[in-house]
Amino acid sequence: MRGLPYYLISEMKLPHKIRKLAQPLTYRRAWRRVRRSFFPLPLAPLRAKIDQERLREIQQRYAGSPEGFSKYADVDRYLRVNRERVQDLKLHRSTPKRVLDLGCGGGFFLFILKKLGHSVLGLDVGHIDLYTELVELFDVPRVLWKICAFEPLPDLGQKFDWITAFSVRFNLYQPSKRSWGSAEWDFLLRNLQRHLTPGGKIFFELNPPDYHASELGDFFVSRGATVERERIFFEKGLRLPSVSYAPFGSKESELTSVAEADNHELHG
Ligand SMILES: C[S@@+](CC[C@H](N)C(=O)[O-])C[C@H]1O[C@@H](n2cnc3c(N)ncnc32)[C@H](O)[C@@H]1O
């Protein structure tokens, strides 16, 4: 559009802007913002629960750190991000729930939930020292575990009403960084079902390359989720095709049986 007069460019952009306004996504985002203001969650009482001296000491130590994740020492910023997550899932106006957060990072989300009276458990590979220090600062219980494709989670000693995962990274093969496909997600969902109470909910917030994969979106919908770009919400639990479960370890036969069940569901 270089070289065109400004008024022509803005006229060309106008239909795009109007189209964007009419999109359900724009509408849902706006509605979430409104709902947050109707049901605020003040940060001051949460901040007051943090040992400020210890926090300052952590922040000073990571201030000059070249690694990208040192930004997480900006506790205020990430408390705000996670306050929105809590509000959008309406967990600040819910009865106490048991919540498992996969890839919990520094534990911001669970810290807020814990202060609201929920019972929380984080799960993370735990290789980032700053996260470990923050989880300890927030006194958030955490299980160290690396989620791997086609491998079940450990026994967590309880079932959960909610399983969440934000800015998901465990779905990347290393070192290729190739993202999981439907088969890997299907295995995880089936495994998570075993960790959920009846009627339990699952919420994932994916990263851009994953939510742009439309076949993955279709897969999540087929399993009972509502999908809004990066937001994958199994609000009414999972819809899993009935399969005769192959024992863990027998990945090939399990995948075959899942594929057969899907095929059966589709074609009767
Ligand atoms: C981008 S951070 C997101 C942290 C947090 N969920 C948030 O949104 O602030 C991704 C987290 O996932 C964890 N992680 C990455 N791969 C994992 C794996 N295979 N199993 C468990 N945790 C993993 C990392 O250690 C990190 O804490």
Image (cartoon, rainbow, N blue to C red):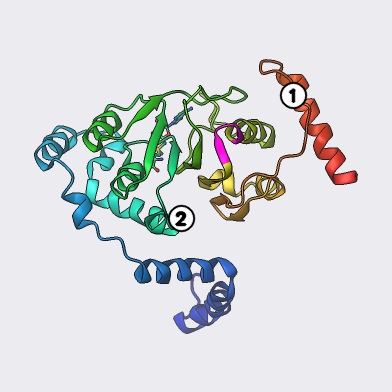
196 is within the stretch colored magenta: yes
Q: Secondary structure at mark 1?
A: helix
Residue 250, image quadrant: top right
Total marks in image: 2
Q: Residues within 10 Å of mark 2 (few under 14, many from 20)?
A: some
Q: Which residue occupies 41% across, 29% down?
A: 124
Q: Is residue 133 magenta?
A: no
Q: Which residue is mark 1?
A: 254
Where 52 falls versus 2 (above or below)? above
**Residue span colored magenta:** 193-197
**What quarter of the picture does the C terminus occupy?**
top right
Q: Which of the marked residues, 2 or 1, is nearer the chain's N terminus?
A: 2
In x, y percent, where is residue 135? Answer: 28, 33
Indicate left or right for 80 with 202 as reference.
left
Q: Position of residue 212 (x, y in %)?
A: 60, 49
Residue 53's disc number: none
Residue 40: name its quadrant.
bottom left
Give the farthest residue toward the left: 53
- Whether residues under marks 2 and 1 lie with C-beta atoms below 8 angstroms apart, the answer is no
Q: Residue at x 53, y 80 (%)?
A: 14
Q: Is mark 1 within 8 Å of ligand 1?
A: no
Q: Nearer the viewer, residue 246 or 172?
A: 246
Give the residue pinned by disc 2: 89
Which is nearer the eye, 145 or 140?
140
Task: Please tell me which residue lies in front, 36 or 105.
Answer: 36
Question: Depth check: 34 or 64 in front?
Answer: 34
Label 2 vs label 1, nearer the camera: 2
Is the residue marked by circle 1 packed among few (<14), some (14-19), or many (20+) residues within 10 Å?
many
| Residue type at the position of mark 1 | Glu
What's the distance in space between the residues labelled 2 and 1, CA to CA?
33 Å
User: The residue under label 2 is which amino acid type?
Assistant: Leu
Q: Is residue 223 left or right of residue 264?
A: left
